[in-house]
Image (cartoon, helix red, strand yellow):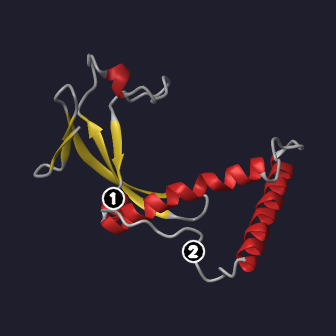
Amino acid sequence: MEYLSEEDAFICAKSRKLHYSHRRKSKSKTGFTWESKVYVCESCNRCGYKSECQRYVKKSTKSSAKQICITPGYDSVLQDNQKRILSSEGIRLRTNRSIQVEDAFGVLKQDFQFRRLLHRGNNHVRKMLYLLVMGFNISKLHHRIQDNRIHTSLFCQKEIA
Protein backbone atom coordinates (compact mmCIF):
# COMPACT_ATOMS: atom_id res chain seq x y z
CA MET A 1 0.00 0.00 0.00
CA GLU A 2 1.09 3.50 -0.72
CA TYR A 3 1.48 5.88 2.23
CA LEU A 4 0.41 9.53 1.95
CA SER A 5 2.39 11.39 4.60
CA GLU A 6 0.62 14.74 4.16
CA GLU A 7 -2.77 13.14 4.88
CA ASP A 8 -1.50 10.40 7.22
CA ALA A 9 -3.37 7.80 5.17
CA PHE A 10 -2.78 4.75 2.99
CA ILE A 11 -4.20 3.93 -0.43
CA CYS A 12 -5.21 0.35 -1.16
CA ALA A 13 -5.04 -1.50 -4.48
CA LYS A 14 -8.56 -0.29 -5.37
CA SER A 15 -7.50 3.37 -4.76
CA ARG A 16 -9.53 3.67 -1.56
CA LYS A 17 -8.11 5.54 1.41
CA LEU A 18 -7.41 4.07 4.80
CA HIS A 19 -7.62 7.01 7.23
CA TYR A 20 -5.99 7.19 10.64
CA SER A 21 -8.53 6.11 13.26
CA HIS A 22 -6.90 5.74 16.68
CA ARG A 23 -3.93 4.50 18.67
CA ARG A 24 -3.96 1.05 20.23
CA LYS A 25 -1.80 0.04 23.18
CA SER A 26 -0.98 -3.66 23.40
CA LYS A 27 0.82 -5.83 25.91
CA SER A 28 2.37 -9.25 25.29
CA LYS A 29 2.37 -12.22 27.67
CA THR A 30 5.92 -11.33 28.71
CA GLY A 31 4.90 -7.79 29.67
CA PHE A 32 6.32 -5.96 26.64
CA THR A 33 4.10 -3.02 25.68
CA TRP A 34 3.87 -1.24 22.34
CA GLU A 35 1.69 1.33 20.64
CA SER A 36 0.17 0.91 17.17
CA LYS A 37 -1.58 3.30 14.83
CA VAL A 38 -4.83 1.92 13.40
CA TYR A 39 -6.02 2.89 9.91
CA VAL A 40 -9.53 2.08 8.67
CA CYS A 41 -10.71 1.92 5.06
CA GLU A 42 -13.52 4.18 3.80
CA SER A 43 -15.46 1.26 2.39
CA CYS A 44 -14.67 -2.20 1.10
CA ASN A 45 -18.06 -2.74 -0.58
CA ARG A 46 -17.89 -4.22 -4.09
CA CYS A 47 -14.11 -4.41 -3.98
CA GLY A 48 -12.62 -6.96 -6.34
CA TYR A 49 -9.53 -7.35 -4.14
CA LYS A 50 -11.43 -7.99 -0.90
CA SER A 51 -10.75 -11.74 -0.81
CA GLU A 52 -6.98 -11.22 -1.19
CA CYS A 53 -6.84 -8.10 0.95
CA GLN A 54 -8.86 -9.44 3.89
CA ARG A 55 -8.10 -13.14 3.71
CA TYR A 56 -7.28 -13.33 7.45
CA VAL A 57 -10.44 -11.58 8.63
CA LYS A 58 -12.99 -13.86 10.27
CA LYS A 59 -16.21 -14.33 8.32
CA SER A 60 -18.35 -13.40 11.34
CA THR A 61 -16.89 -9.90 11.59
CA LYS A 62 -19.70 -7.34 11.33
CA SER A 63 -17.69 -4.42 9.97
CA SER A 64 -16.24 -5.40 6.65
CA ALA A 65 -14.00 -2.34 6.40
CA LYS A 66 -10.31 -3.14 6.27
CA GLN A 67 -8.13 -2.19 9.24
CA ILE A 68 -4.35 -2.15 9.37
CA CYS A 69 -2.06 -1.54 12.34
CA ILE A 70 1.30 0.17 11.94
CA THR A 71 3.92 0.18 14.71
CA PRO A 72 6.29 3.11 14.04
CA GLY A 73 8.68 2.21 16.89
CA TYR A 74 9.10 -1.31 15.56
CA ASP A 75 9.68 -0.03 12.04
CA SER A 76 12.51 2.25 13.23
CA VAL A 77 14.15 -0.69 15.06
CA LEU A 78 13.89 -2.77 11.87
CA GLN A 79 15.58 -0.01 9.87
CA ASP A 80 18.42 0.21 12.41
CA ASN A 81 18.89 -3.56 12.29
CA GLN A 82 18.87 -3.52 8.49
CA LYS A 83 21.65 -0.90 8.48
CA ARG A 84 23.73 -3.01 10.89
CA ILE A 85 23.20 -6.20 8.89
CA LEU A 86 24.20 -4.57 5.60
CA SER A 87 27.28 -2.82 7.02
CA SER A 88 30.72 -4.27 6.29
CA GLU A 89 31.03 -5.48 9.91
CA GLY A 90 27.59 -7.16 9.72
CA ILE A 91 28.46 -8.91 6.45
CA ARG A 92 31.73 -10.16 7.93
CA LEU A 93 30.02 -11.51 11.05
CA ARG A 94 27.23 -13.19 9.03
CA THR A 95 29.77 -14.83 6.71
CA ASN A 96 31.64 -16.28 9.66
CA ARG A 97 28.46 -17.31 11.46
CA SER A 98 27.24 -19.29 8.46
CA ILE A 99 30.23 -21.63 8.59
CA GLN A 100 29.98 -22.24 12.34
CA VAL A 101 26.38 -23.40 12.67
CA GLU A 102 26.38 -26.53 10.52
CA ASP A 103 29.44 -27.91 12.26
CA ALA A 104 27.57 -28.52 15.52
CA PHE A 105 24.91 -30.67 13.82
CA GLY A 106 27.57 -32.62 11.95
CA VAL A 107 29.47 -33.36 15.18
CA LEU A 108 26.27 -34.47 16.95
CA LYS A 109 25.33 -36.79 14.11
CA GLN A 110 28.75 -38.16 13.15
CA ASP A 111 30.94 -38.05 16.28
CA PHE A 112 28.25 -38.44 18.95
CA GLN A 113 26.29 -40.84 16.70
CA PHE A 114 23.04 -39.09 17.61
CA ARG A 115 20.38 -39.97 15.07
CA ARG A 116 17.05 -39.70 16.86
CA LEU A 117 15.40 -38.64 20.11
CA LEU A 118 14.51 -41.56 22.35
CA HIS A 119 11.79 -39.81 24.36
CA ARG A 120 8.45 -38.17 23.66
CA GLY A 121 7.04 -34.97 25.05
CA ASN A 122 8.44 -31.46 25.12
CA ASN A 123 10.01 -31.72 28.58
CA HIS A 124 11.79 -35.00 27.85
CA VAL A 125 13.02 -33.81 24.45
CA ARG A 126 14.24 -30.54 25.96
CA LYS A 127 16.17 -32.41 28.68
CA MET A 128 17.73 -34.71 26.10
CA LEU A 129 18.81 -31.77 23.95
CA TYR A 130 20.27 -29.99 27.01
CA LEU A 131 22.35 -33.07 27.77
CA LEU A 132 23.56 -33.24 24.17
CA VAL A 133 24.46 -29.55 24.14
CA MET A 134 26.34 -29.84 27.45
CA GLY A 135 28.26 -32.85 26.13
CA PHE A 136 29.07 -30.98 22.92
CA ASN A 137 30.31 -27.92 24.83
CA ILE A 138 32.41 -30.00 27.24
CA SER A 139 33.95 -31.86 24.31
CA LYS A 140 34.71 -28.57 22.58
CA LEU A 141 36.27 -27.13 25.76
CA HIS A 142 38.36 -30.28 26.24
CA HIS A 143 39.78 -30.05 22.71
CA ARG A 144 40.54 -26.35 23.15
CA ILE A 145 42.39 -27.01 26.40
CA GLN A 146 44.39 -29.80 24.74
CA ASP A 147 45.33 -27.52 21.81
CA ASN A 148 46.06 -24.55 24.11
CA ARG A 149 43.40 -22.39 22.38
CA ILE A 150 41.39 -21.19 25.38
CA HIS A 151 41.28 -17.47 24.58
CA THR A 152 40.92 -17.68 20.79
CA SER A 153 37.89 -17.91 18.55
CA LEU A 154 36.99 -21.26 17.03
CA PHE A 155 37.46 -19.97 13.49
CA CYS A 156 39.61 -17.14 12.25
CA GLN A 157 37.28 -14.50 10.93
CA LYS A 158 37.38 -14.03 7.18
CA GLU A 159 37.91 -10.59 5.72
CA ILE A 160 35.38 -9.55 3.09
CA ALA A 161 36.84 -7.79 0.04
| Residues at discs 2 and 1 in contact (Cβ within 8 Å) | no
Q: For mark 2, give the secondary structure.
A: loop
Give the left or right position of residue 41, taking residue 74 as reference. Answer: left
Give the left or right position of residue 120, taking residue 43 as reference. Answer: right
Q: Residue pushed farthest left?
A: 6
- Where does the image place residue 96, in percent across and percent down from the top left? 48, 62
Q: Report the amino acid beneath label 1.
A: Gln
Label 1 crowd bin: few (<14), some (14–19), many (20+), radius 10 Å: few
Quadrant where the image shows the C terminus? bottom left
Q: For mark 1, give the secondary structure.
A: helix
Give the left or right position of residue 119, taking residue 25 as reference. Answer: right
How far apart in space, not on screen, are marks 2 and 1 (Cα)? Answer: 26 Å
Front in this rendered view, residue 106 or 42: 106
Mark identifier at residue 1: none
Give the left or right position of residue 155, taking residue 93 as reference. Answer: right
- Where does the image place residue 22, in percent across and percent down from the top left? 32, 52
Q: Is residue 28 visible?
A: no
Image point 25% across, 48% down: which residue? 20
Q: Residue pushed farthest right?
A: 118
Q: Which residue lies under the disc numbered 2?
A: 153
Q: Is residue 16 visible?
A: yes
Image point 73% across, 68% down: which residue? 140
Between label 2 and label 1, give the one nearer the viewer: 2
Q: Which residue lies under the disc numbered 1?
A: 82
Q: Report the amino acid beneath label 2.
A: Ser
